Amino acid sequence: MNFHLNMIQDKIEFFEAHDLETLEKKISEKIEQNTAIMLEVKHVSHQMSIDYDKGLKWYSAVVHFKYKA
């Protein structure tokens, strides 16, 4: 039986929350987890949208992690 271990080179994760603080907390926790597997943040993109009927804000973010050489 042969095992082949491949390093993760790139990883993209999506996050969403109703407030900015919660979104920030989710991203920070994931950064800590991914640092343990040798991934660092390469790029972050974020967006806010508003549900005008309910008056709620919705925050989302995409974080691109890349292997730390």
Image (cartoon, grey):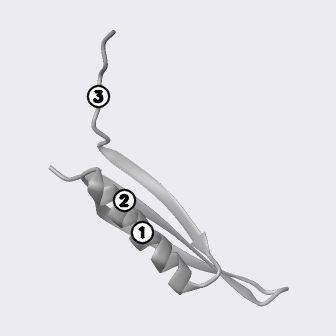
Q: Which residue lies furthest to the top in this view?
A: 1
Q: Which residue type carries mark 3?
A: Leu
Within 10 angstroms of label 1, few (less than 14), some, or many (20 or more) residues?
few
- Name the residue located 54 percent from the left edge and 76 percent from the top edge: 47
Residue 6 coordinates in the image, percent (x, y): 29, 31
Q: Of helix, strand and loop, which one carries label 1?
A: helix
Residue 49 coordinates in the image, percent (x, y): 65, 79
Determine which residue is flagged by label 2. Answer: 33
> Which residue is at the front of the view, 27 or 60?
27
- Name the residue located 83 percent from the left edge and 86 percent from the top edge: 54
Determine which residue is flagged by label 1. Answer: 29
Q: Of helix, strand and loop, which one carries label 3?
A: loop
Determine which residue is flagged by label 3. Answer: 5
**What distance separates the C-alpha of mark 1 from that of mark 3?**
25 Å
- Name the residue located 30 percent from the left edge and 63 percent from the top edge: 41
Q: Is residue 61 above or below residue 20?
A: above
Q: Which residue type carries mark 1?
A: Glu
